[in-house]
Each structure stands twice: as C-alpha cells, then as structure tokens.
Amino acid sequence: MMKKLKFGDIIIVICIIAVAVSIYFFDSNAADTVIVEADGKVVKTLDIEQDCEYIYKDKYTNIITVKDGQAYVSHSDCPDLTCVYSGKINDGGKIICCLPNSLIIRIETKKSKVDVISG
Amino acid sequence: MTRKITLCGVLSTVAIAVSSLERFVAIQPIISLPGIKLGLANCIILFALIRLDLKCAFSIMFIKAFTVSLLFTGLTSFVYSFVGGLLSLFGMWLLLKMKRAFSVFGVSIAGASLFNIGQIFAAAFLLKSIYIFKYLPILLLSSLFTGAIIGVIVYFLSKKLHIGWL
C-alpha cells in the first residue's frame, strides 16, 4: 500500500506543514495585553501581568480569568464548552474562542502588532 | 440514471449516519479545538468523487451538512461545514484530475486540510476577526492524520469494490 504513494502527495504534506508552521510562528513573542473581542470589536483589554477576572455577557456568559501571566476561560454557560476546555494561553501564538458567543480572546505584544496576515 | 440517483441517496444516508456517530464520540474535552473531528463522512464524499461524479458528490456533501446541522448543531455550523465541504470538494476534484501525480492518500489529506481551511475562513468571516487563523496550525496538523486515515479507508473500499484507478 505504501508503494501507492505518489510524488504529489509528498508536496501536499510539505505544503500543509509549511503553512501550519508559518502561521504558528507569525506572532508568538512575550505576552503583554489580553484582548477580548466580540463580533470583531475589542470589548476589553486586560494586562497579562495583573491577576483579574472579567465577565462577558452576551448570548451566553463567559468568565475570563487572568492569573500568573496566563489567560483562560474559567466558566461558561455556552452549549459548546470548547472555550473552557481550551486551557490557558500566554503568548500571541494561541487564542481561545467561544464560537456560540462570537468571542475571541487573544494576546497582543507591544513589539509587533499584527495588522495583516500575508500568504 | 436512476441507479446513480439511488446510489447518491444511499451514500447521503450513510454519510449522515457516520457523521452522527462521530458526534457521540466526544473528543472536545480531550482536544479542545472547534472543528476537530475525524471527518469520516469525507470518506463517503471522496468515494462518491471517485465512483460517481462531482455533481453527486456535491449533493451528498450538501445533504449531509444540512441534515446534520438540522439534527444536531445549528445554522452557524452548517455554514462552516458547507464552506469547508465546498473547498474540500473542489480541491479533491481538481487533484483527482491529476492521477499521475496524486494518489488517494494525497487527495484525502488535501481534502481534509482544505475542509479545515474553509471552516476557518468561514469562522473568520462570521466572527469578523483575523485572529481565528491562529487555530489553523494545529487543525492542519490533525488534518494530516485524519486525511491519511480516510485515505486508507477509501483505498481499501475501492479495492474491495473493484473500483478503477488507485
């Protein structure tokens, strides 16, 4: 069965890995501010160094906790709960999102603000 | 002609059944990514592309996305599924035209990753945020594996059913 692999297959796999790696390393520097976006608009910015809790209420309620230089969703009543299971983020390379609530939590650094993603 | 329609119908049902079964294997607490799934229905769709034609495969994809979202997940997830399925379908159809360069595994992996890419684009559009692309790296890596598994399944299916090519 392995003999059936063709040249194009390898190209595809390499392309996929290349895209994945380039997106991942695009902006993962030391953390700075936690940005909470709903429907594409920034609703709240928090300092990652300061422990605090922020409650966002829309269709559903999400409680976003910043602690020990990490941000995570500590509670949510959305039907999905992917946001809660997403764990903690501490750099610009990762995000947490709550799709049912149109909510995105990300981290932005002072050094590089991402305006456009190329490629 | 009727045989074709009947086959489409049967395959659609299988796709829905398989997709529903997938949902009961709850992977969310372990790998917490939206949109991560085994995508076994892509098996059916790829098979339809090989055995039937693009029109049939498209109808199967659409029916599956529509029914599953009606039954379980809701309208937004239909949009994600449809956009992903469309991109994946078109990509696989293109690659299948170049059988000299790509085997079923490559087509399947490409299909899986295109599905995820389509979903992310739809999510970026709906959530109006470019940062949703941050999910793409891990989704793409998982699509390598799921695509390979689907490719293996379709390979053996085609062998057993003596479908040409491969």
Image (tube, rainbow, N blue to C red):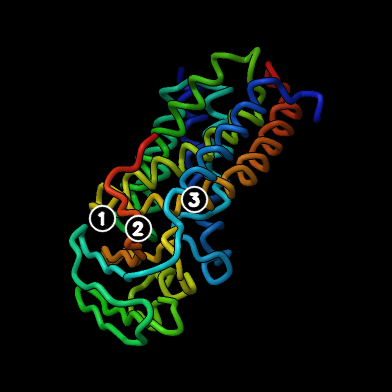
Three-letter code, disc 3: Tyr
Label 1: state its secondary structure: loop
Distance CA(mark 2)–CA(mark 3)? 17 Å
Q: Nearer the viewer, residue B51 or B37?
A: B37
Residue A24: image tag: 3
Q: Quadrant of residue A94?
A: bottom left
> What kind of residue is marked 2?
Lys
Q: Which mark is residue A111?
A: 2
Q: Residue under mark 3: which chain is it in?
A: A
Image coords of residue B80 (percent x, y):
35, 48
Along the line of sight, which residue is nearer the eye, B86 or A11?
A11
Q: Nearer the viewer, mark 1 or mark 2?
A: 2
Q: Could you say where residue B66 lies in the image, as x and y percent from the top left?
A: 35, 46
- Asked if both marks, 2 and 3, belong to the same chain, the answer given is yes
Question: From mark 1 to mark 3, how far is it between C-alphas?
Answer: 20 Å
Q: Chain of mark 2?
A: A
Q: Label 3 near label 2: C-beta < 8 Å?
A: no
Query: Circle 1 sits on which residue?
Result: B127
